[in-house]
Image (cartoon, rainbow, N blue to C red):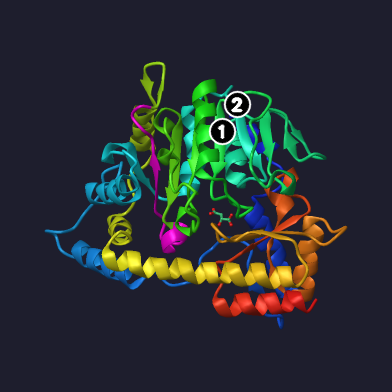
């Protein structure tokens, strides 16, 4: 008789955003006349930039002819994309990252869930609290998190690093020493970040204690301040302790197209075992490459036209962030984030839990956001709004919230 992976049984409830979608669908079915504005999941709303569309059309046409048709993509990514990434995302910023340290994938969500596979089961993970749920859930599935305390919303074997108003959302070195440290900067969900100097302290810490930082830089395109690092490799010594995850979802609107990459430096070694070689082995076995058409679209992100168009797109969303931030502070809310990231993190009104506020906003303003407690216990009492809506919907949502 077969047995299942019992770790899955430990997962509480469903995935945060599936749970929210179910609640919103039920409300919408019961109230078909209400126009709901969705500022919950961080999904983009603006169309793909013209340079990207043009590159995709060109690639589709190539697929129509035997001489230019492509079958399986190289499992680690096409050279044209890996070199565009190495050049533009790294060397242009002074980071010495080679093409063979870049692994193209179908997105940072998969990579952030999969990366834990190359580490031993008894590694201790440390996460910021609140945190993007995939980091914790994927470690639960792998049996690395111990038992769940439903009342506290915490796993016995996970090291939580609270990030709240009290510490200005800057994680502090934990008392227990972790083996794997997940950092998402600029941060999802709080929309806040840390300075390059503070990140350097984390890199030094990881090298000192022999930990690996899994650095999720999905929101780097939204950085507006000079002293914030776009890549962990801007820090000295990061190549011996950090893996970086990147996405094309937020900087180029690929949430439905799917493309991302992971950087595993060759200098990152456990004894004499190369993590780069391990990830290459894992990728080669379990992944057949991102589609050619999509990788050509990714290449266009780095073209001159692509870069100019995407700068405008990022500015469009950041204008939404500004409007939400200013509108809500004007209405008396305490708000954070929205300067280097497209998320606004607000304190729920006195006495309201995150889920109470979710229901209140949905029922009275017909606006969907994300309850902070869905990201971890320290998210209780907070609420996230995304700046990825259309300008029109963002303005309407703010008016509705102000008028509550
Ligand atoms: C979010 O809303 O936190 C993100 O859209 C989720 C994701 O990127 O997978």
* Tag 2–tag 1 contact (CB < 8 Å): yes
Q: Is residue 362 left or right of residue 141?
A: right
Q: Quadrant of the C terminus?
A: bottom right
Image: magenta residue range: 249-267
The residue singled out by tag 2 in the image is 178
Indicate whether 26 appears above or below 181: below
Indicate whether 37 appears above or below 260: below
Taking the image as four quarters, which one is ligand 1 found in? bottom right
**Magenta highlight on residue 256:** yes
> Can see residue 285?
yes
Residue 220, horizontal then vertical, whole percent: 47, 53
> Can see residue 4?
no
Q: Residues within 10 Å of mark 1 (few under 14, many from 20)?
A: many
Indicate whether 96 appears above or below 71: above
Q: Is residue 193 left or right of residue 223?
A: right
Residue 79, horizontal then vertical, whole percent: 23, 46
Which secondary structure lies at badge 2?
loop
Quick one: which residue is furthest to the right in this view? 351
Q: Nearer the viewer, residue 239 or 370?
A: 239
Checking the image for residue 181, the label placed there is 1
Q: Residues within 10 Å of mark 2 (few under 14, many from 20)?
A: many
| Residue at (62, 33) in percent of width and height | 126
Residue 262, horizontal then vertical, whole percent: 40, 42
Which secondary structure lies at badge 1?
strand
């Amino acid at each position: 008789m077969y047995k299942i992976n019992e770790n899955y049984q430990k997962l509480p409830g469903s995935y945060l955003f599936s749970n929210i979608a179910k609640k919103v669908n039920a409300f919408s079915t019961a109230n078909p006349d209400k126009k709901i504005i969705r500022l919950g999941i961080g999904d983009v709303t603006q169309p793909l930039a013209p340079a990207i569309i043009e590159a995709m059309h060109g690639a589709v046409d190539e697929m129509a002819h035997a001489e230019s048709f492509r079958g399986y993509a190289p499992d680690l990514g096409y050279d044209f994309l890996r070199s565009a990434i190495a050049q533009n995302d790294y060397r242009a910023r002074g980071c010495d990252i080679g093409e063979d340290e870049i692994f193209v994938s179908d997105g940072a969500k998969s990579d952030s869930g999969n990366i834990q596979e190359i580490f031993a089961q008894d590694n201790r993970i440390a996460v910021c609290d609140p945190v993007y749920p995939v980091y914790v859930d994927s470690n639960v599935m792998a049996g690395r998190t111990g038992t769940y305390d439903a009342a506290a919303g915490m796993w016995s074997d996970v090291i939580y690093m609270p990030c709240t108003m009290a510490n200005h959302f800057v994680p502090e070195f934990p008392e227990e020493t972790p083996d794997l440290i997940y950092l998402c900067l600029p941060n999802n969900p709080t929309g806040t970040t840390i300075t390059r100097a503070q990140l350097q302290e984390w890199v030094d810490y990881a090298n000192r204690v022999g930990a690996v930082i899994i650095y999720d830089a999905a929101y780097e395109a939204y950085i507006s301040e000079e002293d914030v690092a776009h890549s962990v490799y801007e820090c000295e010594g990061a190549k011996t302790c950090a893996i970086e995850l990147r996405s094309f979802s937020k900087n180029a609107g690929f949430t439905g197209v799917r493309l991302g990459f992971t950087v595993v430096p060759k200098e990152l070694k456990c004894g004499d075992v190369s993590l780069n070689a391990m990830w290459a082995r894992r990728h080669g076995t379990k992944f057949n490459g991102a589609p050619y058409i999509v990788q050509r679209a990714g290449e266009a992100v780095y073209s001159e036209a692509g870069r100019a168009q995407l700068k405008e797109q990022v500015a469009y969303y950041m204008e939404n962030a500004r409007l939400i931030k200013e509108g809500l502070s004007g209405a008396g809310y305490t708000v954070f984030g929205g300067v280097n990231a497209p998320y606004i993190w607000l304190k729920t009104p006195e006495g309201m839990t995150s889920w109470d506020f979710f229901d209140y906003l949905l029922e009275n303003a017909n606006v969907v956001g994300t309850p902070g407690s869905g990201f971890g216990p320290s998210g209780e009492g907070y609420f996230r709004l995304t700046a990825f809506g259309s300008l029109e919907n963002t303005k309407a949502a703010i008016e509705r919230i102000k008028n509550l």
